[in-house]
Structures are given as structure tokens and as C-alpha cells.
Amino acid sequence: MATSSAAPPPPTDSRQFRRLRTGHLLILLLVTHTPLTVLWGAVPESYRSGQVEASPLVWAFAGIVLLGFVFGYSGLAKRLRHPGGVYVQVAHGLGRPIGVGAAAVMLVAYVGLMGALYSFFAGVLKGLVLSLFDVEIPIAVGVVFCAVGGVLLSRLRPRRLVPLFSVILVIQLITVVVTMAAAFSSPAGGTVSYQSLEPGGLLTGSFGVALVLALMASAGTETAANYTAELANPVRSLPRATYLSYAVTTAVGVGGALAVSALVGPTNATAIAQQAGPALFPVLVAQVVGVENAVLVTNILMAVLLTGVFGATVGLQGALVRQLAGLSSDGVLPPALIRPNARGKRPLVLNVAHPVASGLVALLFADEAGALKSWVTIGCTLGLFAMLTLASLSATVWFLRGEADESGFFGWEGQVVAAAFSAVTLFLIVVYGLTHIPALDTSDTSGATWYVLALIFLPFVLGVVATLVMRETRPEVYAKIGRGGLPDGDSEADELATSSRAVAPQPAAAATRYAAYPAAPPPSAGPYAAGQNPSGPYADGPYAEGPYPGNLQPVDPYAAAQPGPHSPVPYPAGPPNQYAALAHPEPANRPGPYPAGATPAGATPAGVNAAGPYPASGQPEAPYPPLPQREAPAGDIPRPRVPQDASWPDALNRPAVPQRAGAEPTPDGYTWWDDNGERAPEPDDGRPAVGSRSLDRRRWDNTPER
């Protein structure tokens, strides 16, 4: 028998200290929509398109909707350690076809949003260079610069990007706080007005349009689910970081809208936003610092804004890389996307494909000022929130199926309520946005509604149809959708190949139940004696290759002095005598239950000696049927009897008991077979003799009469 050495201790994960924590994830989420980007672009646009005086309340309501979404969606997201993100949740709750359809929509949405960021970066860079050097550069220069820089940085591990993103966010937050403080220090009329916080102001303009635009500013926070495989503790980090990210964005939106209202007056904010258009923020800066300082301050703010937009593109690229890797590991996309190259690095195509597509979107649909066609941004954002609606519905279905183990309001019941609330709310917002596209489209594109519908439903339908075809043609790949994923680790392909939660390899003898046995089968190793093998799978003999696949035999638990984890040695001398209940051997010269030559034909299986139950090999040839049991007659107390023998201790001797009439008494008080192999006659009272014959040297006994 093969022996095995002790398994080595599992290797420690040297990368564990580099896993992402809550603070790291929060920075990665905040950089996808930096505070100054929200204050410069989203807040003025909500005033301009929504025309709602109470815009701070609109931003507050948007924050409540998003926080409710996080409470429901994170309950399922934190359980799925998969880089696919939202599409994996949809696949687990609503099925694989809908999950792949959601993945297709989200890929299109992220490519479009990155195109919008590229064009925005190019427009700001063009204005800054023109202001500083009086040189006009084409939009393509800014698009290429942003795309190439994003590709290079997205190949770094998230932990290496966190310091850079931290610096960007600190600068952004300081800039936002100073700008808001300056706005509140120079209010219209000399007094800060809080009229914009009155609920009646929500009835002015279009609350739905303003709400959609406010929600668009938070796009990117849902990418937290793409980092679950790299989090040290996703159960804690994912909901906390997502809550804080939405809270910061909501606070910036509410504070920025309130600052605009205080600076120009609640009733004038919508009119000034309509007149100034995208340049509302520089106009407000000039009003605060004066015309003579406006250019310098605006240039500083534009430089800070460039860092934020660039960080947002890198953050979205990192999430998109992980989603593509998740689809590739599930078999939906070609595995070559994640197959390491000769140097063990991730293929470059995984980082280059989507920036190229986003750059083409920016070059094709951006104007000379760097403003992308608004229907592209609207379609991508509404498609993204439509998939978040499916994610909320998926979490609701998953929890209602009873697959969660928490209880109480903050357990699965509360998460079902929150997920259902966010699903209904987001669904209504998406439907409202789809039915009011002309009001949202500031570029007044003809046929914008059809373009937006095509951006959402066309990739979704294609994804669903492709998955249904895959279910019929490649069922093994279909079964992996949403269940494959990547091993835990950092973003590099060489580290994705191994995982900290991977089980350490075990030696062959310790990892299998069976140990290798010699090629020649041992005699009497199976339940059938030689030549008695039934027909069937063992037509050539059950032990030509052994009864176990691969010529393996189960480890003998009674083998003498056999080491190893599967060979305990409680009986070093061989198999125990299971019938020696009194731990005393019978005399060697004691006759068996059948006198010589008197064994009935067929009573003893082949290979079993009449004098004992064991063949020459020391093991029974076949299992014996259980002894028939009989209820003791009323008044009788059957007691096992021990034969008397002078060689046994006196304490074990028992006096003979009287036998029922008709039974042949024996010296030890038992009824035996007679010399002709016939049983003793039935007793006179009509009751048959109690007991049965077996090969284990148990005797026929009669219940003694009282």
C-alpha cells in the first residue's frame, strides 16, 4: 500500500495586504464622477434643462433614490465575487439570457460615457491652451491624449492608482469647498436666500427632467460590483463605499445647487442658466472674483477640472476592463482576451479595444467645442439606469427565493423592500426619460428618440438572442455564464492566475479516498469467489482490473501497522474477532455446531469451513443475512446462554436450565442438531423452538420455562 507524507501547510498569500479596503474602493468610485465635474457640468445643466427653482430638493431626492438602490442591490452584489459586476447579479436573479443582454447594454453605455468624457476633456483642454498660449488645437488631440493616458494607467493595479486618485480628489474637494464658500459670501441682494428649499419650487419647470439629469451625475458608482473579487471584505466594503460615494455626490449636488441659488437668487437661477448655457460656471466665477481675476481663476479651475475628467476616464476604463474580463472568463467573449502573454501579462487588446471605440464616438459625435451630441449621453445614461433597474429587480427575486440567511429588517426582508422600491422608482424614472427625450436633448437632434431607443434595446435583444443560441449550441459555456469569473487577485493577468482562496495542492495519497494497490488482485478481495462472478460489467472477472476504476482498492482499515491518514490501526494484529463478546477464545478442540459429515447440503457457502465462520483467508466470503428476530412470548425472558466449560472462569459458569418438553437436552443446556442433521422435535405445547442457526457459532436455544 502506498504511503503518504503529511501535507505541507498551505502557502500564505503575500498579496493579501494589497487587497482593496473600504477607503480604496471609495476613492475608485468617487473618481468616476469627481466633485468639480458635478459642480461644473451637472448642476448648471439641471438648472438649464429642468428649469426647477428648488433644484437642491431635486438633488436630495435623487440621493434618496440612490441610497435605497444601494441597500437592496448591495445585498446580492457583496455575495458574488465576480468581475462582471451588475450583469452577474441580473444573471443570478433573472436568468442568463437577460444577464448577457444587460452586459451588452452596459458595455455600450460605458463606451458612450467614456466618449462623452473624452470629448469633454478635449474641449476643456482646447480652451485652456487657447487661454494660456493663444493656440487653438483640434479636438482630436485632446481625445487621443486622454485615451492613451487612460490605457497606460488602466494597466496598473488599483492599489497603485489610489495615491494618484487621492491627490486628484483632495484638490477637487478643496476647490469645491472654496468655490461654494465664495458663492455664499457674495449672495444676491447681500443676504443668503433659502427659498430654493421650499417644496413649492418643485412645481416650477420639469421635476422629472431635472431628476434624470441629477441621477446622470452619479453614473459610475455602480462599478463597485466589478471590484468584489479584489476586495478583502466585500460584505463590509462594498455597501459602505457605495453609500459614501453616493452621499458625497448628493452633498456636492445639493450644496452646488444651493450655492448657485444663493449667488444669483432663486428666481434668477433658471433664467441665467438658460442664457449662459454650458458656460454658466465661468460666468458665476467672474461674478464672484471680478472680471480682472476671472481669467486666472478660471484657468486654475479648468486645470483642476482636467485632472478630474482624466481620473474619471481611467476609473471607468478599469471597471470596463474587469467586465470584459468577466465575460471572457465566462466564455461569452473569446478567452484570448484574458490569456496571459509570454511575459505573464494581460493582453493589451483588453485595455485598448474600448478606448478606441470611445475615441471614435468622441470624434464622430462631438462638435468643435468638445460637446458630444446630447442624445448619446442621454441614451447611454438611461440604458445604464435601465440595467440598474433590472439589478434591483434581480435582487428582489433572489431574496424572495429564500437564498439569503439574514433575518430582520436589515436582513433579507428589509433588502427586499429596498430593492423593490428602487426597482419601481428607477423604472418610472427611465420610462419618464424615454418619453421626454426631446426635452432632455439640448442639441435638438432630429430622430433623437429613435437613436436612444436603439442604443438601449438593440444590444439587449442581441445579447438575449445570442445567449439563447448558445444554450442550444454550447450548453457547457451557457452553464458558466455568471458562475465562472476570475480568481481573486489584482488586475494583472499573472496574479489573476492564482488566488488567495485557492486550495493548496494535496499529495495524491491524501487527496484521494483510494490508495494505489498492486496490479495483481489479492485473493478473495471481492464479494464473489473465483468462478462465481455474475455476468454484466465484470464478464471477464471482477478483478481483471479491480472493482474500482484505475486498479484502485479501498484502504484496508485492519492492515497491520499501516501509516497514513486513511489507515488507522486500531487492530495491529489483523481483523478483530467480532464474535468473541467475552474476550476469551474458545478451546481449539471444541466441536462446531455440525458434527463431522452431518452438515446439511447447501447450508454452508462455498469456501466456509463447517467448524468456523472464516475461510482460510481469514475473511468471510459473503455477508450473512441478519438473524430473524421474534417477539418473546408473554412471561418469557429470553436470555443468552454461555456454554459451560471447565477451562472458563467459574464466574462464567451457569447452571443448566430445564428445557421444554420434546427438546433434546445437551450438557451445556442448549438444543443441538441430532446426529442425522435433523432438528429436535417440536415441544408438546405447540410452540416452536426459539432461535435460528447461523455460521457465527451461535446456538439453538430454548426459552426456559418459569
Image (cartoon, rainbow, N blue to C red):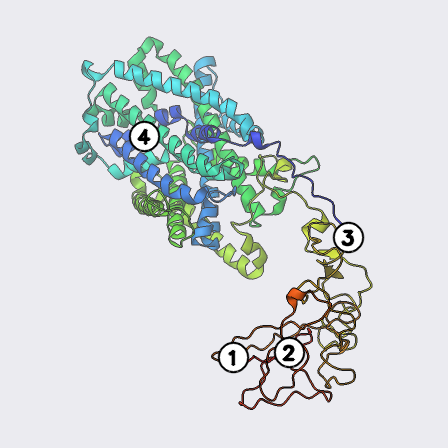
The answer to whether marks 4 and 2 mark residues whose Cβ atoms lie closer than 8 Å is no
Among numbered discs 4 and 2, the one appearing first in the sequence: 4
Distance Cα–Cα, label 4 vs label 3? 76 Å
Residue that label 2 marks: 669
Q: Nearer the viewer, residue 70 or 507?
A: 507
Q: Secondary structure at mark 4?
A: helix
Q: Is residue 677 left or right of residue 448?
A: right
Q: Is residue 323 left or right of residue 271?
A: right
Amino acid type for the residue under numbered disc 4:
Glu
Position of 197 relative to 444 (above/below): above
Q: For mark 1, does the 10 Å Cα neighbourhood hold few (<14), some (14 to 19), or many (20 or more) residues?
A: few
Distance Cα–Cα, label 1 vs label 3? 60 Å
Residue that label 1 marks: 706
Q: For mark 4, does the 10 Å Cα neighbourhood hold few (<14), some (14 to 19), or many (20 or more) residues?
A: many
Amino acid type for the residue under numbered disc 2:
Gly
Q: Secondary structure at mark 3?
A: loop
Amino acid type for the residue under numbered disc 1:
Arg
Q: Secondary structure at mark 1?
A: loop
Among numbered discs 3 and 2, the one appearing first in the sequence: 3
Q: Position of residue 652 (x, y in %)?
A: 65, 67
